[in-house]
Amino acid sequence: MGFFDVLLQQVINGVSLGAMYALLALGFTMVYGIIELINFAHFNVFMVGSFVGLWVFEAMGFSGQSEVLYGLPLIGVLLAGLVVVMLATGFLGVAIERIALRPLRGVSGTAPMITTIGVSYILFNLVLLTVGANTLNYANPLPKVSWDIGQATLRLREVLLWVVSFALMLGLHYFVRYTKMGKAMQATAQDQEAARMMGVDVDRVVVMAFFLGSALAGAAGMIFGLYYNYTSFIIGYTAGLRAFTAAVLGGIGNIPGAMLGGVLIGLIESLGGQYLEVRWTDVIIFSILVLVLVFRPAGLFGRAAPSKS
Amino acid sequence: MSQYRFVRGGLKTVAVLGVAALTGLIGLGTAHAQKTVKVGISLPLTGADAEDALHIKNGAVMAFDEANAAGTIPGYKIDIVVYDSGTATAGQYDPAQAATNTKKLVADPAVVANVGPQMSGEGKAMAPILSEANLATITPSSTNPDITNPAMAAQFKPKGKAIYFRTVTTDAYQGPNMANWMHDKLKIKSVYVLDDSGAYGVGIADSFQKQAEKIGIKILGRDQLNPKEADYTTVLTKIKALKPDALYYGGVGQAGVKLAKQAYDVVPNMIKAGGDGMQGQAILKGVGFPAVEGWYCTNASPHTTESPEAADWVKRYQAKFNNAPYDDYTITSYDAALVVIDAIKRVVATGAAPNRDNVRDAMQTAKVKTIQGELSFDPNGDLLTKVVSVFQYHENKAGPADNLDVQAPYIGVAPETPQS
């Protein structure tokens, strides 16, 4: 492999990682944009999503990577899985909002944020206690198809990851920009009081933000399983922290910023690993988090909504 | 009629009371005749190591239960105290939890010995605390040589006496012997070395790397994996570009499962090998075929599960634990418990009451017949016999899917010096 083959391969790896971080970062950013709350339960909604995906594929009769599908049946199975997972985690997000966070709405200070950490631990331990701690082999109907570009390899699962992430992000973008609900979300993000006075049902908007954010996290969880062929109760931790960094890097509350932030973090991770050492990856990523917080607290792309204070 | 009933009922009550009183007396009687000693078992029963830890626990529990049932130690019954050194936050073994558990063990004066730990990372945290209390432990699987290295005694046995015994040999043999074996049998000329940042992983990767260099295998690079990280394609891509003949991974299952899965995608045809961290149910099930196909791994013990000495043991094990899987380290754990039982027995035979000091001294002078042969220890607590066995994962669809002897057959002994 020549220099450019390696570079291309690492860019492919990095963009794939980044697409996953971006999907996860969107949920953080949407909820923060609307109620200025960092939702740490999001990490583990992602993890639950990947287990729901595993169960769905197992229920459809897949186990391990031995049975594969091609063409339309593959697309059908993946879409069915995606819909079930997104609905399940979407409603999980709504339940978290309704049960744990709505009673605290209007409470100032860090109480709601601490509550999300608590919810995160509850999800984490529920999964640990019910499915156990073993790393599980993911049921995966994707065939092992790949294309060679020079000496770099582009695999089907990378293409799938890009297509699904891009489609979901595009869908979200149009939803927020052009639908009535989306406009209500933007209005709430700018000024909750004024939006309420204009007849926006703020509670519904918040529920919607949790639903969409959690559904995207679930989708990311399922894609994670298909991409890496495994899942475990602990996957929310690293991916979640990276995604959080991506959201801050892009400007928390800013939807396109979260997408770009995710891809940037993915690229830093893969190129840093190639040209420095893998063990330094975390140091680089979290140094960037600190630097951004110190010098550009609004993130590289700034906040979409003006600050309320 | 009603009176008759009353009388019968009354008699019944008396009879029941009488029987209860009698059994109570008998119960009290036996409790008085038989004294108990406590033995700890500390293993990471939560997290990525849990499944293999459970089989190790089974091995020790089986030996203690058999000894209690057979009355091996006259007048004494062994009580097992189990501690879990794995935590959800670590996702695998947790040295801090191992230290906390050891403090609890040490605080109970009835505890005379311990079986464990599974992992060297736990062992490093436990050894100094055990040394302070002169409480001996015997590990069926932790192989990092530092803990019993006399040059590091100040750190791991500040009180001077050996308190860390093993029924396996150390990575001072496991890593280098595997380097020799790969040099002899696989004719590798170059290798890329990875570890999982843990005490065991770094140690075995270092010792492998040192011996490989010494016998002329070129080291094309060395890197460290974060076991909580999901993605290793970056480092695997880097390895692919360097084209080594083989990849050697020192580490346990949490990183190992992911590494093996992703290596199957990125470098499917490269020779891949690991230590005993890559041997076990966690790898077999977590990685699964086809990704695990072809991986070499080692054990720091003789291969015993298929030996004639173990045939009867396997039957008893499967009857007791409902056909649970087992591997060589289930047997080293059974053997470790045998060493403890033998030590307590010899102390009791002298007429003394077993305590930490005399049980430790008895373990030091052990000459115990176990399934893997007669075991004795050097003054540091290490086994006098040093055997490293090599295995290779190879799918056998006809055999039971969770039997390591079938799915990762034994292929030989890794030599202490290169043969060719």
Image: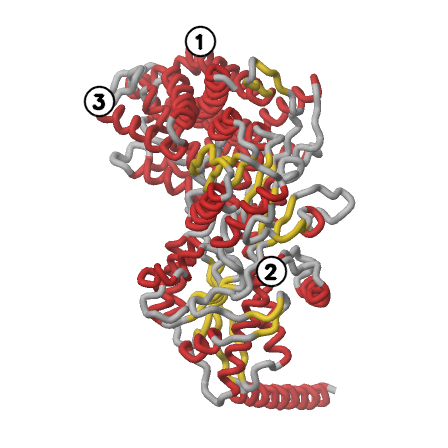
Residue A170's x, y, as percent?
A: 48, 13
Residue located at (56% from left, 70% from top) = B375
Q: Quadrant of residue B60?
A: bottom right
Q: Quadrant of the C terminus of chain B?
A: top right
Closer to the N terminus: mark 3 or mark 1?
1
The mark found on residue B148 in the picture is none
Farthest front residue in view? B420
Above or below for A210 versus B34? above
Q: Is residue B91 visible?
A: no
Asked if badges 2 and 3 are on one and the same chain, I answer no
- Quick one: label 2, few (<14), some, or many (20+) residues within 10 Å? many
Query: Are dots 3 and 1 in contact, CB under 8 Å?
Result: no
Sort mark 3 into few (<14), some (14-19) or many (20+) by Cα contacts within 10 Å. Answer: few
Q: For this rendering, which residue is in front, A31 or B352?
A: B352
Badge 3 is on which residue? A295
Give the x, y percent position of residue B339. 54, 72
At label 3, the amino acid type is: Phe
- Residue flagged by tag 1: what amino acid is it? Tyr
Q: Chain of mark 2?
A: B
Name the residue furthest right: B398
- Residue indicated by mark 2: B330
- Which label number is shown at residue A178? 1
Q: Secondary structure at mark 1?
A: helix
Marks 1 and 2 sit apart, C-alpha to C-alpha, by 63 Å
Disc 3 to disc 1, C-alpha distance: 34 Å
Closer mark to the observer between disc 1 and disc 2: 2
- Return the chain for callout 3: A
